[in-house]
Amino acid sequence: MTPAGVDASFDDDELRPPSLIAGRQQQASGQALHVDDRVITASGKNNEEEAVSMVPSMAAGSPCSSTTAQFAEPGVHVVADLLRAPTAQAQKSQIVMSLGVFLLSVSLGASALRFHDEILDATGIQSGLLLGSIGSLSMCAVIIGSYLRTKWYRRHMHTILLNLALCEFCLAVSFLLEPAWNRLGAGVDSDLSCRWLSTAREYLIMCSSAWTTCTALDLYYLMTNPFTSPRLNRHKYQGIAHVTAFSSAIIMCVSNSFGSPVAVGSFCWVGADTQARSEHIRYKQPSGSTTGIWVFIVTPATISMVANLYVTLVSYGRFRRGVSATLRNRRVLLREGFLTTVTLIAYSALLWGVY
């Protein structure tokens, strides 16, 4: 998979010390024009790495006391302030998007239970696999389309989310093309092995899990090192994700990991080859080893969820104690990273819990 492109104009400030960014913001705020109680700034550019807003400095006093008053904020209000959407329009958009995702998930889940036999007879694909892939395809298409159409979405955290969406999009397409794989002799209904299709899917699944873990890693970097470069970190995450996925795919391809039955439906992945060929498999008395399940399913999901949960707890504790002046310039990044990490925890728990 090719790395997602990033608009360089959104990374102008990421390599500069936060003190210089804050100083430039104070200078720009001094040039603001007050018209009808509205502040019109000379520059209309609103980058993600810049601070959202600063508390007005004191009218009198030393520069030290002015700076202290400018950034002073009780720690108990930091979490609520970071979780609050920057504008009313953005907050409304988040609510509408969250409600839409919830309704889509509920409707697809209900349809999978209600029309289980009908969908299986018509398509030859398990209803949960088919409708789940359709849901993933729809949500990933929205993420990819928004990133390509709107320049505002080409931000640091959205770029990481885009790479995750690309992996999930390709994985969903591979599941929807299951009848085609069978016709081409690469599926579970053929006389050939599922090895190559399972290896490709393992690459996409592990790449997706790695990007989920990199989301937590990115938030940890932003919290512990305010001088870190998001642009350089994105290149690092590309290497981590694809090297991990490639290594996992190679291990699956060369090892005998397809002999352990697992209740995933009739499609190529861990244990799919044995499950498709044996009609005497009973889950109470499995005929194969469960090593593949622990290596390729349980371990990656556990590592990803533990990493996200740990970073979320650390970030919450730091937010409660207050965000220093150096971190305040990364306020938008911290907010988006925190929300994305919490969302991925819930998503992973639901996905692998149902599985």
Image (cartoon, rainbow, N blue to C red):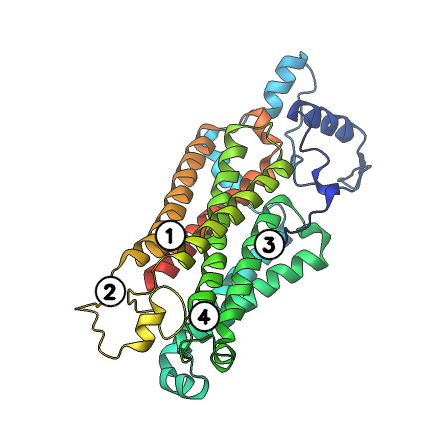
Q: Along the polypeptide, which appears first: circle 1 or circle 3?
A: 3
- In front of the other: 267 or 66: 267
What x and y, as percent, mark residue 258? Answer: 34, 64
Q: Is residue 128 above or below residue 154?
A: below
Amino acid carrying label 4: it is Gly
Task: State which mark lies toward you, 4 or 1.
Answer: 1
Q: Which residue is mark 4?
A: 132
Amino acid carrying label 2: it is Gly
Q: Along the polypeptide, which appears first: circle 2 or circle 4?
A: 4
The residue lying at 56 percent from left, 52 percent from top is 161
What x and y, as percent, mark residue 183? Answer: 50, 82
- In front of the other: 30 or 123: 123
Identify the image quadrant of the C terminus.
Answer: bottom left
Secondary structure of the residue carrying tag 2 is loop
Q: Which residue is mark 1?
A: 301
Mark-to-mark CA distance, 4 and 1? 18 Å
Q: Which residue is mark 3?
A: 162
Task: State which mark lies toward you, 3 or 2.
Answer: 2
Amino acid carrying label 3: it is Leu
Secondary structure of the residue carrying tag 4 is helix
- In front of the other: 66 or 279: 279
Q: Residues within 10 Å of mark 3 (few under 14, many from 20)?
A: many
